[in-house]
Amino acid sequence: LLDSGRLPWTTYLIPDFWVSLCLAVLDRTEEALLAANEVRRRAERQGSASDLPGAYVAAGLVHGLCGRLDDASATFEAGLTVMDETDFIEMMAQEILKKS
């Protein structure tokens, strides 16, 4: 479905995030890391400022669950940098205020 173009690419970030976490919990570390990194790469390719921080969080959590703490720390740091560079917090706050 992703390649069909019938659904937006962001539709797949959240399920892929949960798949990666489930694989990590099941101790299928290599598959988990591949899935988490694919979420991050897809968000990077699309350049979506709102989805990219979540993709870094997903990858960081999986690295942490797989015992790769240095990789987890580096991934979280990269996510924080992206959040800072894109004014992510301000952007999310504005979106929340629009809906209230």
Image (tube, rainbow, N blue to C red):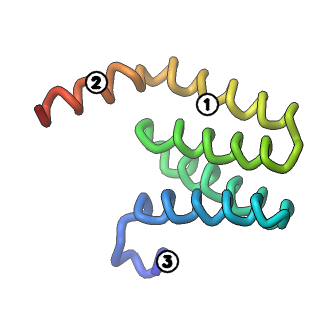
Residue plotted at (69% across, 43% down): 61
Give the label on residue 3, or none.
Answer: 3
Residue 22 position within the rendered picture, expressed as x and y whole percent measured from the top left? 68, 63
Residue 62 position within the rendered picture, expressed as x and y whole percent measured from the top left? 73, 49
Q: CA distance from mark 1 to mark 3?
A: 26 Å
Give the label on residue 68, or none.
Answer: none
Q: Name which of mark 2 and mark 3 comes first in the sequence.
A: 3
Residue 93, above or below 38: above
Decide which of 53, 4 is in the foreground and name it. Answer: 53
Residue 69, above or below 47: above
Circle 3 SS class: helix
Label 2 vs label 1, nearer the camera: 2
Give the amino acid type for the residue marked by disc 2 in the picture: Ala
The residue under label 1 is 79
Circle 1 SS class: helix
Residue 95, above or below 4: above
Q: Name which of mark 2 and mark 1 comes first in the sequence.
A: 1
Give the label on residue 93, or none.
Answer: 2
Residue 38 position within the rendered picture, expressed as x and y whole percent measured from the top left? 66, 59
Label 1 vs label 3, nearer the camera: 1
Decide which of 40, 19 is in the foreground and name it. Answer: 19
Give the amino acid type for the residue marked by disc 1 in the picture: Gly
Circle 2 SS class: helix
Residue plotted at (46% across, 44% down): 51
Q: Name which of mark 1 and mark 3 comes first in the sequence.
A: 3
Q: Is residue 65 left or right of residue 53?
A: right
Asked if disc 2 and disc 1 are in contact, CB closer than 8 Å, the reply is no
Give the amino acid type for the residue marked by disc 3 in the picture: Asp
Decide which of 36, 24 is in the foreground and name it. Answer: 24
Quadrant of res 42: bottom right
Residue plotted at (68% across, 55% down): 36
